[in-house]
Image (cartoon, rainbow, N blue to C red):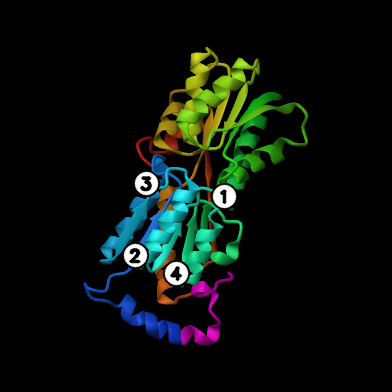
């Protein structure tokens, strides 16, 4: 598999860089590596699990992880990244709020000589990052659509989206592309909920109050699916509408076990966190590393729910 060195520096300089890094990697207590991390929002437990796995590895090596929460504000995230650069971080891990508007901060990281690892998303300019670690987001949407095709011969569908997040864009694209050739599956409405439960519920309420009558809702993630189910229950429709999500969160798996939610596609936040930690140390040591890591996903339904741990993440 194609790999590249830290910040794509020419191979001729690799030995010199490795020599410079060696005293930094093989270090005493007074020379700890500092890793900065900022995720689009920490009120989504998916990112908390990634951060916990990353922290476990970093702190076990005696290094420091500095985590920031921009609460879905890209300008705040850009400010956080610049603050972390001023604090002297050795590497930046970022899950961008907006995959395009994060670019200026990534350019600042590149100018500062700080390598970047992107998790659970892509960015509009991949030349600014060393490694991208994502779930198979497009495939997640495909899995939901394929399940829908197996269980309903036709559908009136509402989409709940997050157009600023590349991962969400890919999930919805995979879902829609799979159904596009069959006119029996119709998209009758769509709304942006930023992947947030508290925004998904009123977003779906507004669509229902406009007179839309879905029998399927495809939500970009499990928190928004929870908001969908709350809105459907309020309207007395929960028993009549299939609800799809993506994450494989404990809450979603329990809803599936109870027969309330139709399906979710399980990502592995644990694997993403572990892969991120591995990439961090490969990059900083000058070792070869993969520039793109795609973590497989798995459909969770009532048929296979017994195979999953309902209390935790994968």
Q: Earlier in the sequence, mark 1 or mark 4?
A: 4
Q: Which residue is mark 1?
A: 136
The answer to whether marks 4 and 2 mark residues whose Cβ atoms lie closer than 8 Å is: no
Residue 95, percent across and down? Answer: 47, 52
Q: Nearer the viewer, residue 83 or 106?
A: 83
Which numbered disc flags the more N-terminal residue, 4 or 2?
A: 2
Region of the chain picked out in magenta, as a range: 1-15
Q: Secondary structure at mark 2?
A: loop
Mark 4 crowd level (few <14, some 14–19, many ≥20, 10 Å Cα): many
Residue lying at 41% horizontally and 55% vertically, measured from the top left: 80
Q: State the mark number for residue 15.
A: none
Judged from the image, the secondary structure of the residue bearing numbered disc 4 is loop
The residue beneath circle 3 is 48
Q: Nearer the viewer, mark 1 or mark 4?
A: 4
Please give the residue where the numbered disc 2 appears in the rendered image. 87
CB under 8 Å between callouts 1 and 3?
no
């Amino acid at each position: 598999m194609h790999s590249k060195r830290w910040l794509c520096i020419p191979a001729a300089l690799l030995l010199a860089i490795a020599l410079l890094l060696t005293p930094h990697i093989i270090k005493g207590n007074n020379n700890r590596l500092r890793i900065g991390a900022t995720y689009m929002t920490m009120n989504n437990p998916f990112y908390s699990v990634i951060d916990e796995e990353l922290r476990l590895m970093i702190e076990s090596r005696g290094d420091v992880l500095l985590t920031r929460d921009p609460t879905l504000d890209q300008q705040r995230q850009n400010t956080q990244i610049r603050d972390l650069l001023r604090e002297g971080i050795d590497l930046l891990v970022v899950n961008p709020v907006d995959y395009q508007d994060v670019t200026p901060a990534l350019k600042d990281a590149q100018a500062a000589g700080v390598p970047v690892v992107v998790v659970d998303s892509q960015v509009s300019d991949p030349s600014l990052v060393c490694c991208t670690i994502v779930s198979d987001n497009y495939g997640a949407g495909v899995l939901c659509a394929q399940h829908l095709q197996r269980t309903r011969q036709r559908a009136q569908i509402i989409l709940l989206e997050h157009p600023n997040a590349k991962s969400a864009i890919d999930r919805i694209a995979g879902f829609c592309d799979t159904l596009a050739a069959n006119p029996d599956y119709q998209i009758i409405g769509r709304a942006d909920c930023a992947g947030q439960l508290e925004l998904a519920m009123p977003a779906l309420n507004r669509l229902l109050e406009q007179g839309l009558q879905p029998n399927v809702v495809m939500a970009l993630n499990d928190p928004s699916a929870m908001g969908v189910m709350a809105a459907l229950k309020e309207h007395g429709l929960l028993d009549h509408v299939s609800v799809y999500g993506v994450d494989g969160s404990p809450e979603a798996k329990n809803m599936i076990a109870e027969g309330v939610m139709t399906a979710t596609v399980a990502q592995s936040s644990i694997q993403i966190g572990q892969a991120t930690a591995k990439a961090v140390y490969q990059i900083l040591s000058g070792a070869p590393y993969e520039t793109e890591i795609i973590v497989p996903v798995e459909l969770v339904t009532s048929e296979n729910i017994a195979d999953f741990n309902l209390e935790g993440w994968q």
